[in-house]
Amino acid sequence: MPESKPRRKKNSQPQETRQSAHAIDKPMPGWYKPVMFGLMLLGLVWIIVYYVSQTLYPIPNIGGWNIVVGFGIAMVGFFMTTGWK
């Protein structure tokens, strides 16, 4: 049985556009990874301190909102993972 010939794809992007895409792939700054992991750990520690201190710390006046603050700090760290290369 005869086999079909493979089709060649046309380059729809001009040469300049393809080169500019490589310019976007710059290395991450040295502070990015420590800040990312630091925020995730800080949020975790915030929540652990809240539970271990029986809701007295880290900020006693906001009560249950300490959980929201802890998760918010941790989520900023997790959102930073999307830009990590």
Image (cartoon, rainbow, N blue to C red):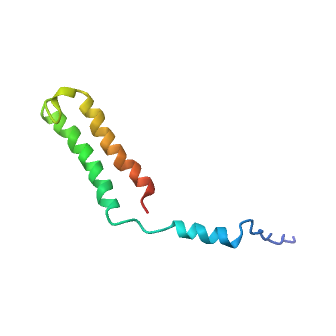
Q: What residue sits 30% from the left and 56% below the top?
A: 35
Residue 59 picture quarter: top left
Q: What residue sits 18% from the left and 35% below the top?
A: 50
**Can you give x and y, in whole percent of width and height, for residue 27 in the image?**
43, 69
Residue 82 left/right relative to 16:
left
Residue 2 left/right relative to 24:
right
**Can you give x and y, in whole percent of width and height, for residue 44 in the image?**
25, 44
| Camera-side residue of 10 and 17 | 17
Residue 6 against residue 56 in the figure, above or below: below
The mark total stands at 0
| Camera-side residue of 52 and 80 | 80
State the quadrant of the C terminus: bottom left
**Can you give x and y, in whole percent of width and height, for residue 53 in the image?**
12, 33
Direction right: furthest residue: 2
**Can you give x and y, in whole percent of width and height, for residue 42 in the image?**
24, 47
Residue 32 left/right relative to 49:
right
Residue 15 picture quarter: bottom right
Residue 10 picture quarter: bottom right
Q: What residue sits 87% from the left and 72% below the top?
A: 2
Residue 49 left/right relative to 34:
left
State the quadrant of the N terminus: bottom right
Q: What residue sits 78% from the left and 71% below the top?
A: 8
